[in-house]
Image (tube, rainbow, N blue to C red):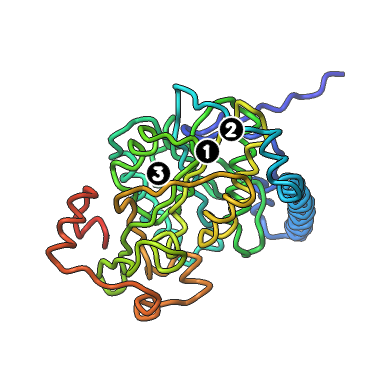
Amino acid sequence: MKTASRSTPACPEGSIPISSRSKTHLLPPAKKSRTYRREALKFRAESFLFSSIYLLKDRHLFWKERRKALADPAGWRQKHPLRETDTDLLVSYFVPIFERRRAPDWEIVQTNLLRTVAALRRQTDARWRMVICSQDRPDRIDFDSRVQFLKYPVSHGGEPDKLHKLRFMARHFANTERRDGYVFFLDGDDIPHPGLTQFILEDNNGHGYFLPLGYCYDRRNRTLLSPTQNTGDIHTFAWHCGSSHAVRFDTRQGKEQTVHVSLRGSHMEARQNLQDRTRLTLSPVPFPAMIYLINHGSSDQDILAQSDGRQRAARGLVPESQDQTKLIQKEFGLSSENLDG
Protein backbone atom coordinates (compact mmCIF):
# COMPACT_ATOMS: atom_id res chain seq x y z
CA MET A 1 0.00 0.00 0.00
CA LYS A 2 1.37 3.40 -0.96
CA THR A 3 1.89 5.94 1.74
CA ALA A 4 0.97 9.54 1.18
CA SER A 5 4.02 11.64 0.38
CA ARG A 6 4.63 14.86 2.26
CA SER A 7 5.10 17.91 0.10
CA THR A 8 7.89 20.24 1.14
CA PRO A 9 6.77 23.86 1.31
CA ALA A 10 8.69 26.22 -0.92
CA CYS A 11 11.23 28.49 0.76
CA PRO A 12 10.11 32.13 0.97
CA GLU A 13 12.07 34.60 -1.14
CA GLY A 14 15.50 35.23 0.36
CA SER A 15 15.31 32.35 2.83
CA ILE A 16 18.16 29.85 2.99
CA PRO A 17 16.99 26.23 3.15
CA ILE A 18 18.54 24.24 5.99
CA SER A 19 18.65 20.51 6.38
CA SER A 20 18.41 20.42 10.17
CA ARG A 21 15.03 19.29 11.46
CA SER A 22 13.23 21.83 13.62
CA LYS A 23 10.20 21.59 15.86
CA THR A 24 9.77 25.35 16.02
CA HIS A 25 7.37 25.42 13.04
CA LEU A 26 4.87 23.08 14.68
CA LEU A 27 1.76 24.56 16.22
CA PRO A 28 -0.84 22.81 18.37
CA PRO A 29 -4.49 22.78 17.30
CA ALA A 30 -6.39 26.03 17.75
CA LYS A 31 -9.34 24.49 19.62
CA LYS A 32 -8.83 24.80 23.37
CA SER A 33 -10.19 21.44 24.45
CA ARG A 34 -8.77 18.48 26.33
CA THR A 35 -7.22 17.36 23.05
CA TYR A 36 -5.72 20.82 22.61
CA ARG A 37 -4.16 20.78 26.07
CA ARG A 38 -2.77 17.29 25.50
CA GLU A 39 -1.30 18.27 22.12
CA ALA A 40 0.07 21.53 23.52
CA LEU A 41 1.82 19.65 26.31
CA LYS A 42 3.21 17.17 23.79
CA PHE A 43 4.36 20.04 21.57
CA ARG A 44 6.20 21.74 24.43
CA ALA A 45 7.82 18.47 25.50
CA GLU A 46 9.01 17.72 21.95
CA SER A 47 10.30 21.27 21.51
CA PHE A 48 12.17 21.13 24.80
CA LEU A 49 13.69 17.74 23.92
CA PHE A 50 14.74 18.89 20.45
CA SER A 51 16.23 22.13 21.84
CA SER A 52 18.14 20.24 24.53
CA ILE A 53 19.61 17.80 22.01
CA TYR A 54 20.53 20.60 19.63
CA LEU A 55 22.24 22.65 22.33
CA LEU A 56 24.23 19.62 23.52
CA LYS A 57 25.35 19.04 19.94
CA ASP A 58 26.22 22.72 19.58
CA ARG A 59 28.30 22.61 22.75
CA HIS A 60 30.15 19.54 21.49
CA LEU A 61 30.87 21.16 18.10
CA PHE A 62 32.04 24.33 19.84
CA TRP A 63 34.47 22.30 21.95
CA LYS A 64 35.62 20.29 18.92
CA GLU A 65 36.23 23.41 16.79
CA ARG A 66 38.29 25.09 19.49
CA ARG A 67 40.18 22.15 21.01
CA LYS A 68 43.07 21.66 18.57
CA ALA A 69 43.55 25.35 17.83
CA LEU A 70 43.71 26.23 21.53
CA ALA A 71 46.00 23.32 22.40
CA ASP A 72 48.59 24.21 19.75
CA PRO A 73 47.85 27.46 17.82
CA ALA A 74 51.10 27.35 15.82
CA GLY A 75 50.64 23.69 14.90
CA TRP A 76 47.01 24.24 13.96
CA ARG A 77 47.88 27.15 11.67
CA GLN A 78 50.71 25.14 10.09
CA LYS A 79 48.23 22.37 9.30
CA HIS A 80 45.59 24.86 8.09
CA PRO A 81 47.58 27.70 6.50
CA LEU A 82 45.92 30.80 5.09
CA ARG A 83 45.79 30.43 1.33
CA GLU A 84 46.16 33.18 -1.23
CA THR A 85 42.92 35.10 -1.53
CA ASP A 86 40.62 34.30 -4.41
CA THR A 87 39.75 36.79 -7.13
CA ASP A 88 36.03 36.33 -6.41
CA LEU A 89 35.80 37.68 -2.87
CA LEU A 90 32.67 38.42 -0.87
CA VAL A 91 32.02 40.20 2.43
CA SER A 92 29.30 38.33 4.33
CA TYR A 93 27.60 40.41 7.02
CA PHE A 94 26.34 37.99 9.67
CA VAL A 95 23.44 39.57 11.55
CA PRO A 96 21.97 37.61 14.49
CA ILE A 97 18.77 39.15 15.85
CA PHE A 98 16.34 38.44 18.71
CA GLU A 99 13.66 35.83 18.54
CA ARG A 100 10.27 37.50 18.70
CA ARG A 101 9.35 36.36 22.20
CA ARG A 102 12.62 37.63 23.70
CA ALA A 103 12.53 41.04 22.02
CA PRO A 104 11.22 43.83 24.27
CA ASP A 105 9.55 45.28 21.16
CA TRP A 106 9.59 43.28 17.91
CA GLU A 107 8.62 46.38 15.90
CA ILE A 108 11.65 48.29 17.21
CA VAL A 109 13.86 45.33 16.29
CA GLN A 110 12.51 45.40 12.73
CA THR A 111 12.74 49.20 12.45
CA ASN A 112 16.40 49.08 13.48
CA LEU A 113 17.01 46.19 11.09
CA LEU A 114 15.45 48.11 8.19
CA ARG A 115 17.95 50.90 8.83
CA THR A 116 20.85 48.44 8.77
CA VAL A 117 19.60 46.82 5.54
CA ALA A 118 19.28 50.24 3.90
CA ALA A 119 22.86 51.10 4.93
CA LEU A 120 24.20 47.94 3.31
CA ARG A 121 22.26 48.63 0.12
CA ARG A 122 24.16 51.95 -0.05
CA GLN A 123 27.54 50.17 -0.19
CA THR A 124 29.79 51.47 -2.98
CA ASP A 125 31.01 47.92 -3.71
CA ALA A 126 28.34 45.37 -4.61
CA ARG A 127 30.33 42.33 -3.46
CA TRP A 128 28.45 41.76 -0.20
CA ARG A 129 25.60 39.77 1.23
CA MET A 130 23.68 40.09 4.47
CA VAL A 131 22.54 36.99 6.35
CA ILE A 132 19.94 37.60 9.06
CA CYS A 133 19.59 34.74 11.51
CA SER A 134 16.73 34.31 13.96
CA GLN A 135 14.03 31.91 15.12
CA ASP A 136 11.49 34.28 13.53
CA ARG A 137 11.55 35.71 10.02
CA PRO A 138 11.11 39.51 10.05
CA ASP A 139 8.08 40.36 7.93
CA ARG A 140 9.07 43.97 7.17
CA ILE A 141 12.31 43.09 5.36
CA ASP A 142 12.45 42.67 1.58
CA PHE A 143 14.57 39.53 1.26
CA ASP A 144 16.31 38.65 -1.98
CA SER A 145 19.52 36.99 -3.18
CA ARG A 146 21.64 39.58 -1.38
CA VAL A 147 19.66 40.07 1.85
CA GLN A 148 18.98 36.53 3.06
CA PHE A 149 17.29 34.88 6.01
CA LEU A 150 18.62 31.78 7.79
CA LYS A 151 16.28 30.25 10.34
CA TYR A 152 17.83 29.32 13.67
CA PRO A 153 16.31 25.99 14.67
CA VAL A 154 15.79 26.25 18.45
CA SER A 155 14.92 28.65 21.25
CA HIS A 156 17.31 29.29 24.11
CA GLY A 157 14.47 29.94 26.51
CA GLY A 158 15.05 33.68 26.66
CA GLU A 159 18.83 33.48 27.19
CA PRO A 160 21.23 35.47 24.94
CA ASP A 161 22.01 33.47 21.81
CA LYS A 162 23.98 35.86 19.58
CA LEU A 163 27.24 33.86 19.64
CA HIS A 164 25.34 30.60 19.04
CA LYS A 165 23.76 32.11 15.93
CA LEU A 166 27.09 33.38 14.61
CA ARG A 167 28.56 29.90 14.93
CA PHE A 168 25.44 28.41 13.32
CA MET A 169 25.81 30.71 10.29
CA ALA A 170 29.52 29.93 9.97
CA ARG A 171 28.89 26.17 10.08
CA HIS A 172 26.05 26.43 7.59
CA PHE A 173 28.15 28.16 4.93
CA ALA A 174 31.21 26.02 5.64
CA ASN A 175 29.03 22.98 4.92
CA THR A 176 27.14 24.31 1.90
CA GLU A 177 29.54 26.36 -0.21
CA ARG A 178 33.17 26.71 -1.21
CA ARG A 179 34.27 30.33 -1.60
CA ASP A 180 36.61 32.93 -0.17
CA GLY A 181 36.02 36.23 1.57
CA TYR A 182 35.47 37.86 4.93
CA VAL A 183 32.79 37.61 7.59
CA PHE A 184 31.76 40.83 9.31
CA PHE A 185 29.99 40.49 12.65
CA LEU A 186 27.17 43.04 12.43
CA ASP A 187 24.42 43.79 14.93
CA GLY A 188 20.97 44.49 13.56
CA ASP A 189 20.86 48.01 14.99
CA ASP A 190 24.11 49.44 13.59
CA ILE A 191 24.86 51.44 10.45
CA PRO A 192 27.97 50.67 8.35
CA HIS A 193 29.73 53.35 6.34
CA PRO A 194 28.96 53.17 2.57
CA GLY A 195 32.63 52.53 1.81
CA LEU A 196 33.27 49.73 4.32
CA THR A 197 32.88 46.80 1.91
CA GLN A 198 34.98 48.52 -0.74
CA PHE A 199 37.84 49.19 1.66
CA ILE A 200 37.94 45.60 2.96
CA LEU A 201 37.99 44.05 -0.52
CA GLU A 202 40.42 46.52 -2.08
CA ASP A 203 42.86 46.36 0.84
CA ASN A 204 42.37 42.57 1.16
CA ASN A 205 45.04 41.73 3.74
CA GLY A 206 43.97 38.06 3.89
CA HIS A 207 43.45 38.12 7.68
CA GLY A 208 40.77 40.58 8.71
CA TYR A 209 39.97 44.04 10.02
CA PHE A 210 38.82 45.88 13.11
CA LEU A 211 37.20 49.29 13.59
CA PRO A 212 39.08 51.57 16.03
CA LEU A 213 37.02 54.52 14.76
CA GLY A 214 33.27 55.02 14.71
CA TYR A 215 30.35 56.80 16.33
CA CYS A 216 27.61 56.01 18.81
CA TYR A 217 24.16 57.53 18.43
CA ASP A 218 22.26 57.85 21.69
CA ARG A 219 18.60 57.49 20.71
CA ARG A 220 17.32 58.50 24.13
CA ASN A 221 19.19 61.81 24.15
CA ARG A 222 19.40 62.25 20.35
CA THR A 223 23.14 62.82 20.53
CA LEU A 224 25.97 61.59 18.32
CA LEU A 225 28.96 60.50 20.41
CA SER A 226 32.58 59.62 19.68
CA PRO A 227 34.98 57.46 21.71
CA THR A 228 37.63 59.44 23.56
CA GLN A 229 40.46 57.17 22.38
CA ASN A 230 41.47 55.82 18.98
CA THR A 231 44.20 53.42 20.11
CA GLY A 232 44.78 50.97 22.92
CA ASP A 233 42.53 48.26 24.28
CA ILE A 234 39.75 50.27 25.96
CA HIS A 235 37.54 53.21 25.03
CA THR A 236 38.14 52.74 21.31
CA PHE A 237 35.13 52.13 19.09
CA ALA A 238 35.90 48.41 18.88
CA TRP A 239 35.73 48.25 22.68
CA HIS A 240 32.27 49.86 22.74
CA CYS A 241 30.64 48.14 19.77
CA GLY A 242 30.27 44.51 18.72
CA SER A 243 29.95 45.53 15.04
CA SER A 244 33.66 46.13 14.75
CA HIS A 245 35.44 43.06 13.33
CA ALA A 246 35.77 41.25 10.02
CA VAL A 247 37.68 37.95 9.77
CA ARG A 248 38.89 35.84 6.86
CA PHE A 249 36.40 33.11 6.02
CA ASP A 250 37.72 30.77 3.33
CA THR A 251 35.45 27.74 2.99
CA ARG A 252 37.49 26.41 0.06
CA GLN A 253 39.46 24.62 2.76
CA GLY A 254 36.39 23.01 4.30
CA LYS A 255 34.94 23.39 7.77
CA GLU A 256 38.15 24.34 9.57
CA GLN A 257 37.63 28.06 8.99
CA THR A 258 34.68 28.08 11.40
CA VAL A 259 37.33 28.27 14.12
CA HIS A 260 37.82 31.95 13.24
CA VAL A 261 34.26 32.54 14.41
CA SER A 262 34.36 30.17 17.39
CA LEU A 263 37.57 31.66 18.81
CA ARG A 264 36.64 35.32 18.39
CA GLY A 265 35.14 35.61 21.87
CA SER A 266 33.94 38.98 23.16
CA HIS A 267 34.29 41.93 20.78
CA MET A 268 36.36 43.69 23.47
CA GLU A 269 38.97 40.93 23.25
CA ALA A 270 38.45 39.74 19.67
CA ARG A 271 41.57 41.22 18.10
CA GLN A 272 43.89 39.76 20.73
CA ASN A 273 42.04 36.43 20.84
CA LEU A 274 42.31 35.94 17.09
CA GLN A 275 45.99 36.91 17.11
CA ASP A 276 46.85 34.51 19.93
CA ARG A 277 44.58 31.62 18.98
CA THR A 278 44.51 31.57 15.17
CA ARG A 279 47.43 33.80 14.14
CA LEU A 280 45.06 36.21 12.38
CA THR A 281 46.41 39.76 12.46
CA LEU A 282 43.54 42.22 12.07
CA SER A 283 44.32 45.56 10.43
CA PRO A 284 42.57 48.82 11.37
CA VAL A 285 40.03 50.41 9.06
CA PRO A 286 41.44 53.96 8.87
CA PHE A 287 38.16 55.90 8.89
CA PRO A 288 35.04 55.95 11.13
CA ALA A 289 33.18 53.04 9.56
CA MET A 290 30.16 52.41 11.80
CA ILE A 291 27.40 54.16 13.74
CA TYR A 292 26.38 52.18 16.80
CA LEU A 293 22.83 52.90 17.99
CA ILE A 294 22.52 52.83 21.77
CA ASN A 295 19.78 53.34 24.34
CA HIS A 296 16.89 52.43 22.05
CA GLY A 297 15.60 49.84 24.53
CA SER A 298 15.86 46.74 22.34
CA SER A 299 19.42 45.44 22.47
CA ASP A 300 21.30 42.99 24.66
CA GLN A 301 23.22 45.90 26.14
CA ASP A 302 20.02 47.69 27.12
CA ILE A 303 18.41 44.53 28.51
CA LEU A 304 21.36 43.10 30.40
CA ALA A 305 23.24 46.20 31.49
CA GLN A 306 20.28 48.59 31.68
CA SER A 307 22.73 51.29 30.68
CA ASP A 308 21.88 54.89 29.91
CA GLY A 309 23.59 57.77 28.15
CA ARG A 310 25.33 59.09 31.28
CA GLN A 311 26.85 55.69 32.09
CA ARG A 312 28.12 55.25 28.55
CA ALA A 313 29.54 58.78 28.44
CA ALA A 314 31.46 58.02 31.63
CA ARG A 315 32.96 55.00 29.86
CA GLY A 316 34.67 57.17 27.26
CA LEU A 317 32.11 58.80 24.94
CA VAL A 318 31.93 62.51 24.21
CA PRO A 319 29.24 64.34 22.16
CA GLU A 320 29.86 65.74 18.69
CA SER A 321 28.84 69.30 17.82
CA GLN A 322 25.65 69.87 15.82
CA ASP A 323 27.63 70.96 12.73
CA GLN A 324 29.87 67.91 12.91
CA THR A 325 26.83 65.67 13.42
CA LYS A 326 25.28 66.96 10.17
CA LEU A 327 28.51 66.27 8.26
CA ILE A 328 28.72 62.73 9.67
CA GLN A 329 25.08 62.01 8.82
CA LYS A 330 25.70 63.20 5.25
CA GLU A 331 28.80 61.00 4.96
CA PHE A 332 26.75 57.96 5.98
CA GLY A 333 23.85 58.92 3.70
CA LEU A 334 21.55 59.64 6.66
CA SER A 335 19.27 62.33 7.99
CA SER A 336 18.10 62.93 11.56
CA GLU A 337 14.89 61.12 10.62
CA ASN A 338 16.89 58.04 9.59
CA LEU A 339 18.45 57.87 13.05
CA ASP A 340 15.37 58.68 15.11
CA GLY A 341 12.64 57.06 13.03
Kindly identify which numbered label has been placed on residue 82. 2
The disc placed on residue 197 is none
| Tag 1 secondary structure | strand
Closer mark to the observer between disc 2 and disc 3: 2
Q: CA distance from mark 2 to mark 1?
A: 9 Å
Left or right, 251 with reference to 332? right
For the C terminus, the image quarter is bottom left
Classed neighbour count for the residue bearing mark 1: other residues with Cα under 10 Å, few (<14), some (14–19), many (≥20): many
- Residue at 47% across, 50% down: 245
| Residue occupying the point 41% across, 69% down | 297
Q: Which mark is residue 248?
A: 1
Amino acid type assigned to the residue bearing label 1 in the image = Arg
Describe residue 62's horizontal placement relative to residue 215 as left or right: right
State the image coordinates of residue 91 (x, y, percent, origin top left).
44, 36
Q: Residue at x 43, y 61 (%)?
A: 241
Q: Is residue 145 visible?
A: yes
Q: Of all residues shown, which one is farthest toward the top? A: 1
Residue plotted at (30% across, 47% down): 193
Can you see residue 39?
no
The mark found on residue 141 in the picture is 3
* Among the two numbered marks 2 and 3 on one chain, the one whose residue lies closer to the N terminus: 2
- Identified by mark 2, the residue type is Leu
Q: Are the two marked residues, 2 and 1, in contact with CB atoms closer than 8 angstroms?
A: yes
Q: Would you place residue 176 above or below residue 226 in this image?
A: above
In front here: 332 or 83? 83
- State the CA–CA distance, disc 3 to disc 1: 28 Å
Element type at marker 3? loop
**Residue 148: x percent and y percent?**
47, 37
